[in-house]
Amino acid sequence: MFKKILIANRGEIALRILRACRELGIKTVAIHSEADESAMHVRMADESICVGPSSAQSSYLNIPAIITAATLTNADGIHPGYGFLSENQRFAEIIEEHNIKFIGPHSSHIKIMGNKIDAKKIMDDNNVPTVPGLNDISNKKDIDNFINKVQLPIIVKAASGGGGKGMRVITDYDDINNAINSAKAEAKKSFNDDKVYLEKFLITPKHIEIQILADSQGNVITLGERDCSIQRKHQKLIEESPSEILSNEKREEISLLCKKAVSSLGYEGVGTLEFLYENNNFYFMEMNTRLQVEHPVTEMVTGIDLVKQQILAASGEKLTISQRDVQLKGHSIECRINAEHPESFIPSPGKITQYHQPGGLGIRVDSAVYQGYSVPSHYDSMIGKLITYADNRQECIAKMKRALEEYIIMGINTNIQLHQKIIMTKEFQSGKYDINFMSTFN
């Protein structure tokens, strides 16, 4: 077991990891930027060390500073959380070279799954259904043949992409060249890789993802699915588990395929396979080789602590949970609480003058903010996650409605009002919403 883990992140996920470490009897080191000197994860860690100025590039993305911090504090493990360097192959390699354990998959797996074209090939080899696509777009005739086969609309995607960067939907044949060139330019700027590919664009799909957990000894289990279809500009807003539209047969079918694919890699740790789901068919999009923001809804319906399991797997321990032990019970919903205007979505940094978070049975708040805390302008606007759990979906929605009404954050703008409106719509109430929901929401 680890003696000391350095948490290479900030905010609520740093605090979440810290709490898991404390329960496992592991000492913690919090890194922070100058802007985060008074952050809660810094206050609660056993040790803390500043790794740079306020900008993420100079601190939370500063690999030499983070490795130096780990070396100075004698950390034997580094947990990357999500975002920042969590899926950075070179970061994982450097950690491995320094004989420190990266709490996540091997760097080679991050590399393979980080390239969406390579990831799709692995899934194809394991009979996991993928979206029809064209990887080599150097030949105009091949593009024309592809369009004739799948019909418009199609979508251009960055091979190394994420977060909606390097993506363009094409509905008109005459827009093809401009869309490809524009996507390439954005991909180069965002990921330093201008390779793009084409896929059939699904018009009204759900966004469904499968959570997996694997140890270093070849044992792999799946932990059900999450429905993440409520999203704006490819950024998720609300997630829930289980999905209202999946039958047990469909769930088991896709879970078995995911397990087989992950086993073929010799993968270790937690991971998520993301799919579009339309007309009772799954289409693989990508695999995230890290902990997901929305992992709490899976924890609530399975009773399994994913962060602890991730740490245990990284320490070399064998899974003590079998697939038979995984039972989905009840329903859970998560709302991402962002410091932004609920209508314009403009970020709203500043000092929180009044703070009261909801409580009660089935209410969980993952957040690192507090009254008097100043939300910095340098990072992502998400300041917390509100999670509810109940025996069924309707009770879970009722709890979320009450919890959102009780959640008070003054001094800055938040999207709490937006969540209140979303969960009361007939589409959300029925569960019959897809990824286009926010584009038609008013």
Image: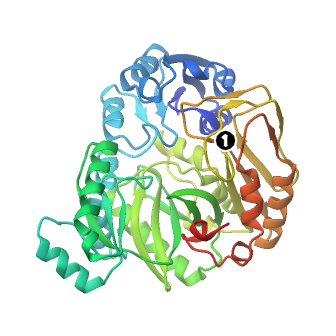
Judge left or right: residue 230 versus residue 408. Answer: left
Above/below status of 40 relative to 172: above
Q: Can residue 303 be seen in this view?
A: no
Residue 420: x %, y % from top left: 77, 59
Split into 4 quadrants, where in the image is the C terminus? Answer: bottom right
**Residue at the (26%, 62%) spot, across then down:** 178
Given residues 271 and 174, the one toward you in this image is: 174
Judge left or right: residue 67 versus residue 121. Answer: right
Judge left or right: residue 49 versus residue 262. Answer: right
Given residues 91 and 46, the one toward you in this image is: 91
Judge left or right: residue 164 versus residue 326. Answer: left
Given residues 422 and 221, the one toward you in this image is: 422
Q: Read off the residue under disc 1.
A: 339
Above/below status of 116 relative to 414: below
**Residue at the (62%, 65%) spot, across then down:** 325
**Residue at the (31%, 43%) spot, across then down:** 189
Rendering quarter of residue 175? bottom left
Toward the top, the furthest residue is 72
Toward the front, the furthest residue is 174
Callout 1 amino acid: Ala
Q: How crowded is mark 1: few (under 14 residues within 10 Å), some or many (20 or more)?
A: many
Above/below status of 170 relative to 53: below
Residue 366: x %, y % from top left: 70, 43
Residue 335: x %, y % from top left: 69, 55
